[in-house]
Image (spheres, helix red, strand yellow):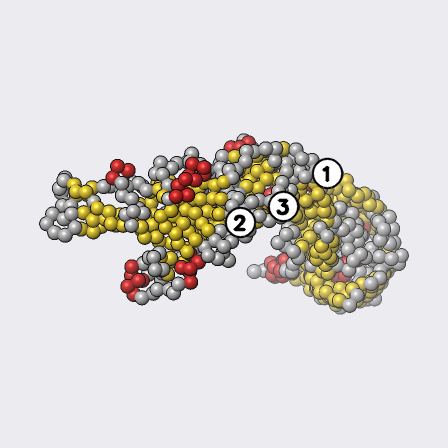
């Protein structure tokens, strides 16, 4: 390869790059909702910002109420509950939040996926059973004596005078352990020891965290400590762990119904399907070097300043509307962060690889993609964009391409 | 291993070394290409002066008339070229397999010959740096334009000695070939901008005819004359004609004098009317002078050449001056011959000077 001494000793033609915004390539778009519900979320958002206000709820797996105290015996004896220890994983928090409190409430044991924020307002008003100052716990000295390490799986802990225990895990998430007495963890035999709790958060500011859920593999856990009578000696001590049979979150205000705009996120989560018509100029005479999807938000997304989620563009394998199967080829994905409570600036998603592939494909290729939230379902926040029905703010594609080179010309 | 196979192995080694994408001259980039030399190693070692009289140089068809048996000759070469433009100098290397001739008597005095030679070399690769404005920001880019291929001259010739002093030759030429071309733009900001690679294949077609004569004034003095007319060179991409350029009308001549049995001297001239071949095309005149000394079985050769190049910027054609030398060695009782040559060229044009060393290797065999 020789350095070109242009223009005298270079080919007459030159490589030409063109930059343009294509405003009419998104030809049809639709929004759908109901993909991931709050009870299927990989994380449970807990926030108290006035508006919005989000609270986690969960119900434990039932526990047996009687045991056999002698091997091979069919006679059972009742167990007597001593206490319980609840583990909550705080998988996301704002590290700049101060005076961060976790508050635990008793909620009705019949909570399910239809339970609303309003239905639980009384429980979250008068049924507080414990509260923990996480910020204060984080300032407590690390305990790493051998007895502590042995008791807590080799990890150091921080604890306060009320017996709350905090562990900082490898991914910097927190495991919070709350000791509950029999008044806080009621062992109700008729209910098979099913208990249900709700979690709120409070802070000087930025009161927004996320608690682990069953779907995210970080579900809450309740360890029961109980005794049962021995045949001829002192009562025997035992423990049994119970995870959450159901976990979810409720929030206020609820996600508004879909309108003529495109919606992404929220709970139940919404997705938007955009169909692209690749223009002939990109198919026949150009090589796309950069393609950026331009979306104009309808307004800012409410939430805690500093919180964010991502809007994710994924091509569909075939266009079946709301039920379109999504491609798993990450090379074609586009991604952009959305900061809550920020300015409603125009959003841009880089989609070069996908648009380039479509421009090179034949005209029968499916050229649609879906905008979805990531992580999907674990946020009350939903962003809305203007659709093709708003001509002045409709989605557009900013394309930079290289024109076909004039080969054969000296 | 026989000596013939050793020679073939050497020839193959020379032909296969070096980069796949050879480059012949920067002067041909902004033109139809770099015209090939219709010369065997023997002729090229004499500056091209012996080409009109050498049966295995595809220049002059009448020279085949004296081939008594079927024989074939092949030419290969490798060149090292330094290109000086502005304050910088770049060294490039190329490998060529530019000519093949086979022929022999068919009926009586009539000799049929064929083969191929490079008509236009169109292989080059250049790289340029620039900064362009995209989305309101300056973006540095690197462009590469690459062409790999050539246009070949497929020749079918008839030659005959029609008189003890006169030999005539006629040939038709199919001009055909192709190049693989690509234009690549790389952005320094490779995170946001993908590399653009646009490629294509160009097919070339053309047609030509030539006639030539050799006239022996005496046993030691021979004159040669030739004329050739080529039509247009049509370039097609996927069946669509993109250019249709004129090819030159050419003619030339030469004289050779034998000073005894172990010395010969020759001179040749040629005119090519490339002027219709595009914006940077020039009509050219080229001359050469050379000698062959020693026994025919192992001669020494020397030559000098000069003239003009067909393509280059400006109103005046770039010039070329070269010297060459070589040796030949017969083997197998004269059934085969190896020729070695070394050539030094200097080409000068507006803003560019090229200096080229070329090592040549040729093989002629008579089964």
Q: Secondary structure at mark 1?
A: loop
Q: Position of residue B319 (x, y in %)?
A: 84, 62
Residue at mark 2 to residue at mark 3: CA–CA distance: 15 Å
- Reading the image, the residue beneath label 2 is A304
Q: Position of residue B69 (x, y in %)?
A: 71, 51
| x and y, in percent, of residue B119 in the image | 76, 51
Q: Are marks 3 and 1 on the same chain?
A: no
**Residue contact between numbered discs 1 and 2, judged by CB atoms under 8 Å:** no
Residue at the spot x=41%, y=40% of the render?
A122
Q: Nearest the camera: A332 or A114? A: A114
Q: Earlier in the sequence, mark 2 or mark 3?
A: 2
Q: Classify mark 2: helix, strand or loop.
A: loop
- Residue B176 horizontal/vertical position (percent): 74, 45
Nearest to the observer: residue B349 or residue A257: A257
The mark found on residue B185 in the picture is none
Disc assigned to residue A344 = 3
Tell which of A141 and B63 is nearer to you. Answer: A141
Residue A244 shown left or right of residue B95 in the figure:
left
Query: Residue A312, can we see it?
Result: yes
* Residue annotated with mark 1: B239
The subunit letter for the residue under badge 2 reads A
User: In the rendered structure, are the residues bearing label 3 and label 1 in contact, judged by CB atoms less than 8 Å apart?
Assistant: no
């Amino acid at each position: 390869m020789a350095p070109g001494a242009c223009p005298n000793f270079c080919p007459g033609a030159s490589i030409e790059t063109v930059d343009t915004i294509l405003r009419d390539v998104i030809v049809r778009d639709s929004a759908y909702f109901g993909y991931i519900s709050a009870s299927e979320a990989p994380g449970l958002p807990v926030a108290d910002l006035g508006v919005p206000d989000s609270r986690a709820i969960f119900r434990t797996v039932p526990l047996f109420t009687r045991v056999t105290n002698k091997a091979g015996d069919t006679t059972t004896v009742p167990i007597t509950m001593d206490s319980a220890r609840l583990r909550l994983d705080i998988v996301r928090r704002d590290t700049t939040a101060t005076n961060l409190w976790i508050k635990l409430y008793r909620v009705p044991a019949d909570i399910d996926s239809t339970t609303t924020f309003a239905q639980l307002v009384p429980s979250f008003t008068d049924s507080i059973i414990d509260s923990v100052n996480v910020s204060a716990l984080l300032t407590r000295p690390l305990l790493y004596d051998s007895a502590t390490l042995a008791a807590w799986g080799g990890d150091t802990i921080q604890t306060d005078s009320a017996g709350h225990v905090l562990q900082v895990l490898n991914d910097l998430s927190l495991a919070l352990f709350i000791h509950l007495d029999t008044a806080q963890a009621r062992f109700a035999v008729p209910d098979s020891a099913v208990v249900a709790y709700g979690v709120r958060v409070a802070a000087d500011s930025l009161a927004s965290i996320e608690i682990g859920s069953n779907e995210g593999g970080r579900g809450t856990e309740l360890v029961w400590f109980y005794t049962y009578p021995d045949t001829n000696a002192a009562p025997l001590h035992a423990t049994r762990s119970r995870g959450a049979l159901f976990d979810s979150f409720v929030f206020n205000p609820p996600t508004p119904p879909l309108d003529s705009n495109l919606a992404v996120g929220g709970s139940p989560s919404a997705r938007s399907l955009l169909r692209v018509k690749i223009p002939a100029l990109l198919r026949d005479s150009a090589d796309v070097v950069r393609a950026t999807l331009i979306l104009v938000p309808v307004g800012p997304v409410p939430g805690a300043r500093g919180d964010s989620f991502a809007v994710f563009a994924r091509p569909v394998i075939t266009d079946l509307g709301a039920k379109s199967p999504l491609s798993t080829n990450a090379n074609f994905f586009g991604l952009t962060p959305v900061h809550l409570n920020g300015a409603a600036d125009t959003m841009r998603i880089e989609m070069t690889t996908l648009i380039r592939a479509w421009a090179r494909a034949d005209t029968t290729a499916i050229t649609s993609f879906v905008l979805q939230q990531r992580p999907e379902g674990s946020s009350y926040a939903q962003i809305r964009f203007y659709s093709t029905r708003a001509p002045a703010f409709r989605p557009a594609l900013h394309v930079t391409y290289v024109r076909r080179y004039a080969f054969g010309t000296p | 291993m026989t000596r013939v196979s050793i020679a073939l192995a050497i020839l193959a080694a020379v032909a296969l070394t070096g980069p796949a994408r050879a480059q012949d001259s920067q002067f041909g980039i902004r033109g139809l290409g770099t015209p090939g030399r219709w010369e065997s190693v023997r002729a090229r070692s004499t500056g091209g002066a012996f080409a009109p009289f050498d049966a295995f140089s595809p220049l002059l068809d009448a020279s085949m008339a004296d081939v008594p048996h079927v024989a074939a000759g092949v030419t290969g070469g490798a060149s090292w070229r330094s290109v000086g433009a502005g304050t910088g100098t770049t060294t490039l290397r190329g490998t060529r397999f530019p000519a093949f001739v086979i022929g022999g008597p068919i009926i009586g005095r009539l000799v049929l010959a064929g083969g191929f030679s490079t008509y236009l070399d169109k292989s080059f690769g250049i790289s340029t740096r620039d900064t362009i404005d995209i989305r309101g920001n300056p973006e540095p880019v690197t462009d590469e334009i690459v062409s790999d291929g050539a246009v070949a001259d497929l020749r079918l010739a008839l030659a005959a000695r029609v008189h003890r002093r006169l030999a005539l030759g006629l040939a038709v030429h199919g001009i055909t070939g192709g190049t693989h071309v690509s234009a690549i733009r790389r952005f320094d900001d490779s995170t946001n901008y993908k590399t653009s690679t646009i490629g294509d294949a160009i097919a070339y077609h053309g047609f030509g005819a030539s006639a030539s004569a050799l006239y022996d004034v005496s046993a030691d003095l021979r004159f040669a004359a030739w004329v050739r007319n080529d039509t247009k060179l049509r370039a097609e991409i996927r069946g669509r004609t993109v250019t249709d350029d004129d090819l030159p009308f050419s003619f030339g001549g030469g004289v050779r004098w034998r000073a005894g049995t172990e010395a010969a001297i020759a001179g040749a001239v040629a005119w090519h009317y490339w002027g219709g071949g595009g914006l940077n095309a020039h009509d050219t005149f080229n001359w050469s002078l050379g000698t062959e000394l020693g026994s025919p079985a192992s001669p020494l050769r020397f030559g000098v050449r000069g003239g003009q190049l067909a393509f280059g910027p400006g109103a005046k054609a770039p010039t070329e001056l070269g010297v060459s030398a070589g040796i030949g060695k017969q083997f197998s009782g004269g059934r085969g011959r190896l020729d070695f040559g070394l050539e030094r060229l200097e080409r000068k044009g507006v803003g560019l000077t090229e200096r080229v060393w070329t090592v040549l290797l040729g093989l002629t065999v008579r089964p």
